[in-house]
Image (cartoon, rainbow, N blue to C red):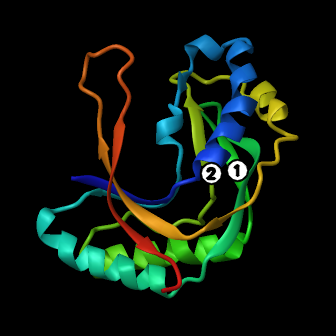
Amino acid sequence: MRLFVAVLPPDPAVAELRRAVAPLHDLPGAAGMRWTGTDAWHFTLAFLGVVDDALLPELHERLGRAARRTERFPLRIHRGGRFDGHVLWAGAAGALDTMRLLAERADAAARRAGVPMDEHRRYTPHLTLARSRTDTDLHPYVEALDSFEGAAWEVGEIALVRSNLPVAGVPGERPRYEVVGSWSLGH
């Protein structure tokens, strides 16, 4: 199954961001973008790819250990950004050093459980809002989110999420995400 480890924002944070993102749908070029549904908003800590079922017990144990070793921390959704002209995202603020540490621990847990991980790169906490298949000027979108400051919440758990990819050829279908495990932080 195709998996990733994530921090899931609470409903009030999602509602705040939804209100901030709604006007972006009226900007030039917005109709040509693939907008991520609010039910899919998350901060990925580690993308695992396709994981063999035989590795799941060890992966669960190691993710639990990584979560217990990490204290709860404050986080809020903060401003916006982009990756090239293809991905629009919302950023994070708060205890980002702790979030980066948690991402490193999730990556290490997967590696130690036998999951072949991609080459390590610097973690950039972000929540994907939209993607574009063509190079798009995302500056107006980023500027529109420049003043967004969501309310803080306490991150209390990590989730192991299964990504069910859309069926090829079905217009408008998006990936569906299913939480298959979660672990409390600091316990």
- Assign a secondary structure to mark 2: loop
Query: In the rendering, at what x and y percent does residue 144 appear?
Result: 82, 30
For marks 1 and 2, give the CA distance: 5 Å
In the image: residue 96, left or right of residue 104: right
Q: Secondary structure at mark 1?
A: strand
| Residue at the disc numbered 2 | 126
Q: Nearer the viewer, residue 155 or 3?
A: 155
Q: Is residue 61 above or below residue 94?
A: below
Residue at 65% from the left image edge and 22% from the top image edge? 136
Q: Is residue 91 toward the left or the right of residue 148 in the image?
A: left
In the picture provided, is 137 more to the left or to the right than 180?
right
The amino acid on which the numbered mark 2 sits, given as a three-letter code, is: His
Residue occupying the point 14% across, 63% down: 53
Q: Measured along the vertical axis of the image, is residue 29 above or below residue 164?
A: above
Which residue is label 1 attached to? 91
In terms of sequence position, does the residue under pointer 1 or pointer 2 come before the other? 1
Q: Tell me the amino acid under the disc marked 1.
A: Gly
Task: Indicate the position of residue 73 as horizontal and vertical percent values.
Answer: 66, 74
- Labelled pair 1, 2 in contact (Cβ < 8 Å): yes
**Residue 129 quadrant:** top right
Instruction: Depth check: give the residue in front, 20 or 83.
Output: 20
The percent coordinates of residue 11 (x first, y second) are 59, 46
In the image: residue 65, left or right of residue 58: right
